[in-house]
Image (tube, rainbow, N blue to C red):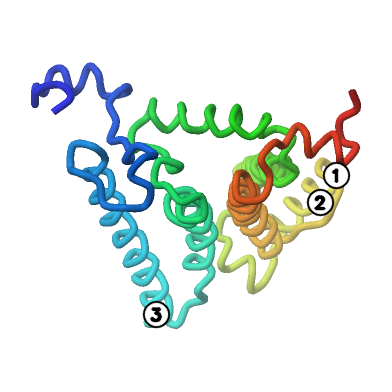
Amino acid sequence: RQVGYNPVLFAREFAVLGVNPPPPQYGLSVAPWASGGAWLAATFFLHISVLTWWARIYTRARANKLGTHLAWGFAAALSLYFVIYLIRPILMGSWAEAPGHGLKVHLDWVNNVSVRYGNFYYNPFHMISIFFLFGSTLLLCMHGATILAAAKYGVDRELEEIELEHSGTHRAQLFWRWTMGFNANALTIHWWAYWFAALCAITGALGLLLSGPVIKDWYAWAISAHIVYR
């Protein structure tokens, strides 16, 4: 409706289009379709889709006698998603606390949350989340680069190398220790990457959950915690 169902305008204006949640006066009630009801419907079905997809990942892993690590990794991402779209808005008493669906509206929401709660960069869980974000990026990049560097020695055949390490893996492990400063083998590097990525979402969820229901001003909190000195 925002572009009159014009496909050309839809493509051109895609980045700024959005489906917004109900205004604050509706609280947690069901709003009319044009005043946030569309967002409620879209978000409800989004909740159903991600939960059923998680269930599929879990049940497929069990059916194939695999570990359920992928399901729990996805659950870590869902922890942040549900804090953003469900848990925190309920605690705050308004669907308006959730972001809209769309590129610009989501970026606006991120900026507004930081401004409203006294600069989100003073949120310690945000700091930790960014640490895990950059850390997982570094780990995955270095892991990929190490495997590519030693691929001619067969190190890319990771399932075989986990069971019985050959010279390629030994070379990669030596290279890793010399350049990264700690030991990691073909199995443990995946545990490092798994937990760094999962904790990025989990700590981000904790930081956002505290913003509003518990902490009203992160800058003031940082002063009281002696992180910032005036």
**Position of residue 61 measured from the top left corner of the image (x, y, whole percent):** 42, 75
Mark 3, residue position:
64
Mark 1, residue position:
178
| CA gap, disc 2 and disc 3 | 35 Å
Alpha-carbon neighbours of circle 1 within 10 Å: few (<14), some, or many (≥20)? Answer: few
Alpha-carbon neighbours of circle 2 within 10 Å: few (<14), some, or many (≥20)? Answer: some
| CA gap, disc 2 and disc 1 | 6 Å
**Is the residue 212 above or below the residue 77 in the image?**
above
Q: Residue at x 33, y 44 (%)?
A: 26
Task: Check the picture and name the quadrant holding the C terminus.
Answer: top right
- Say if residue 151 shows up in the picture: no
49 left or right, relative to 128? left
Ranked by sequence position, the earlier of labels 3 and 1 is 3
**Which amino acid type is shown beneath numbered disc 3?**
Asn
Q: Residue at x 76, y 58 (%)?
A: 184
Q: Nearer the viewer, residue 188 or 220?
A: 220
Task: Check the picture and name the quadrant holding the N terminus.
Answer: top left
Q: Residue at x 19, y 43 (%)?
A: 32
**Which amino acid type is shown beneath numbered disc 2?**
Leu
Q: Secondary structure at mark 1?
A: helix
Q: Nearer the viewer, residue 123 or 131?
A: 123
Mark 2, residue position:
174
**Which amino acid type is shown beneath numbered disc 1?**
Trp
**Front label number (3 vs 1):** 3
